[in-house]
Amino acid sequence: MNETNFFFIRHGQTDWNQERRIQGQTDIALNSEGLDQAERLCHFIRKAGDELSPITQCSVLYSSSLGRAVQTADPLAVLLNKPITPLDALQERHFGTIQGMTYPELESRMPLESQKINQRDPEFRPHTGESLLDLRARVQACLSFLLKQHAGETLVCFTHGGVLDLIYREATDTAIDTKRAWDIPNAGVNHLVHRPQETPPWRVQKWAFIKHLESQTAGANTNADF
């Protein structure tokens, strides 16, 4: 069976995650906890045996070209002695002129835009940014590209909450405007399998796996649109 395994990993924590600021494509670095999360992930993969062992057999490491994703990928790249291939298509949704605001600030300054974001209006495009439909099209094209280039292989891709949200919806045929009911934690691991011979072709094997972070303080940020 021509099975392709994807391990999609969200970047570690940043100060803007803690402050609940809309990061989008603003290039914010990991904070000390985020750097620790990246190291914990790498240590777990090295020591844990079966749970994430397929990652060690991956053929390629992809990462969003934003620094917080690359920083999260760095320890694993060293462990596996593989280069990180940057891929702009894995970048977070661009929120345009509302990037940098907290959600309370957005609600106070731009109530209409805040309402459209909260209601997941698929067509709403922040000024100079992307709509959810734009992001979905980008994610779908990215998945098609990866499947074409790496059918039957195991891939590891470091990315962002908004991208992961759309990947989950794509894999589970969940509507783009449905309220999210699944977690997307910082440094969480998500394992999806694509089998073109099956209908539907996608299966979610693991989602929001954070066993490697269990000793950290509970309550890590899980908002998909940061």
Image (cartoon, rainbow, N blue to C red):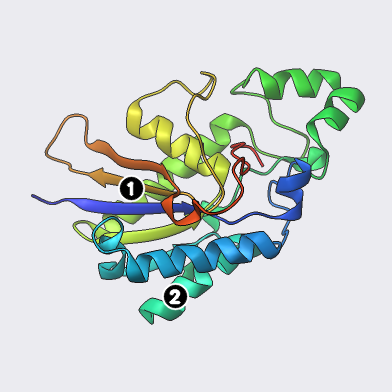
The vertical placement of 96 against 120, above or below, is below
Taking the view exactly as shown, the residue that stands out farthest to the front is 215
- Sequence-first disc among 1 and 2: 2
Place of residue 16 in the rendered image (x, y in percent of width and height, measured from the top left): 76, 49
Tell whether 85 sits left or right of 71. left
Which residue is at a point 42% across and 39% down the rendered structure image?
Answer: 167
Q: Which residue is mark 1?
A: 191
Residue 215: give x, y in percent of width and height.
53, 54
For the residues labelled 1 and 2, the Cα–Cα distance comes to 18 Å
Query: Where residue 213 appears, x then y in whole percent?
Result: 50, 54
Residue found 70% across the figure and 55% down from its top: 14
Locate residue 151 relative to residue 131 in the image: left or right: left
Residue type, numbered disc 2: Ala
Q: Position of residue 179 (x, y in %)?
A: 54, 19
Circle 2 is placed at which residue position?
77
Disc 1, disc 2: CB below 8 Å?
Answer: no
